[in-house]
């Protein structure tokens, strides 16, 4: 079984690459590209923040520290804004399904890794590492 940090790093890399491609498609105007804004925020700044959370999680050890795991969860939740289950209802799903499926698998890996580590840490009485 891979080390929790390897799993997190691989999943975060998937999310970063997919979001960078989305951002590039948005700037280039290449379909299918995301809308420029939502009712709550502009997509480009949100993608930047989401990729920033993923890079920060990688730099802090992803699955090997409490802060890294928290940032992994934040990066996954932010990625689901763009790649969540709501995309199955998107009119362009036929064009974007590879990105949606791979992003969801990466998010599942991050969730499973974070919760597996948290559960095993508390079940064995181990003290959580501080980050």
Image: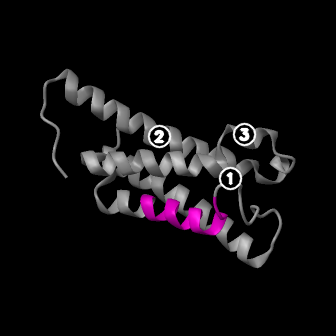
32 shown above or below 77? below
Q: Secondary structure at mark 1?
A: helix
Q: CA distance from mark 1 to mark 2?
A: 15 Å
Q: Nearer the viewer, mark 1 or mark 3?
A: 3
In the rendered image, residue 103, in percent from the top left (x then y), is placed at 60, 48
Q: Mark 3 sits on what residue?
A: 86
Answer left or right for 95 relative to 124: right
Labels 1 and 3 touching (C-beta < 8 A):
no
Our reading of the magenta stretch's main secondary structure is helix
Q: Which mark is first along the chain, 3 or 1? A: 3
Name the foreground residue: 110 vs 86: 86
Q: Nearer the viewer, mark 2 or mark 3?
A: 3
Answer left or right for 67 relative to 90: left
Answer left or right for 108 relative to 123: right
Q: Mark 1 sits on what residue?
A: 99
- Magenta region: 41-53
Q: Mark 2 sits on what residue?
A: 109
Name the foreground residue: 26 vs 112: 26
Asked if residue 116 lies in the magenta stretch, the reply is: no
Labels 1 and 2 touching (C-beta < 8 A):
no
Q: CA distance from mark 2 to mark 3?
A: 19 Å
Q: CA distance from mark 1 to mark 3?
A: 13 Å
In the rendered image, residue 78, in percent from the top left (x then y), is placed at 54, 51
């Amino acid at each position: 079984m891979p080390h929790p940090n390897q799993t997190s790093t691989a999943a975060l890399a998937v999310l970063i690459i997919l979001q960078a491609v989305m951002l590039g498609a948005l700037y280039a105007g290449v379909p299918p590209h995301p809308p420029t804004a939502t009712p709550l925020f502009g997509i480009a700044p949100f993608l930047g923040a989401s990729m920033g959370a993923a890079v920060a999680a990688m730099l802090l050890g992803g699955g090997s520290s409490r802060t890294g795991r928290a940032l992994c969860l934040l990066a996954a939740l932010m990625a689901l804004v763009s790649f969540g289950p709501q995309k199955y209802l998107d009119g362009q799903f036929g064009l974007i399904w590879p990105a949606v499926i791979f992003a969801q698998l990466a998010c599942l890996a991050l969730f499973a890794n974070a919760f597996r580590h948290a559960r095993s840490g508390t079940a064995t009485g181990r003290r959580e590492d501080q980050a």
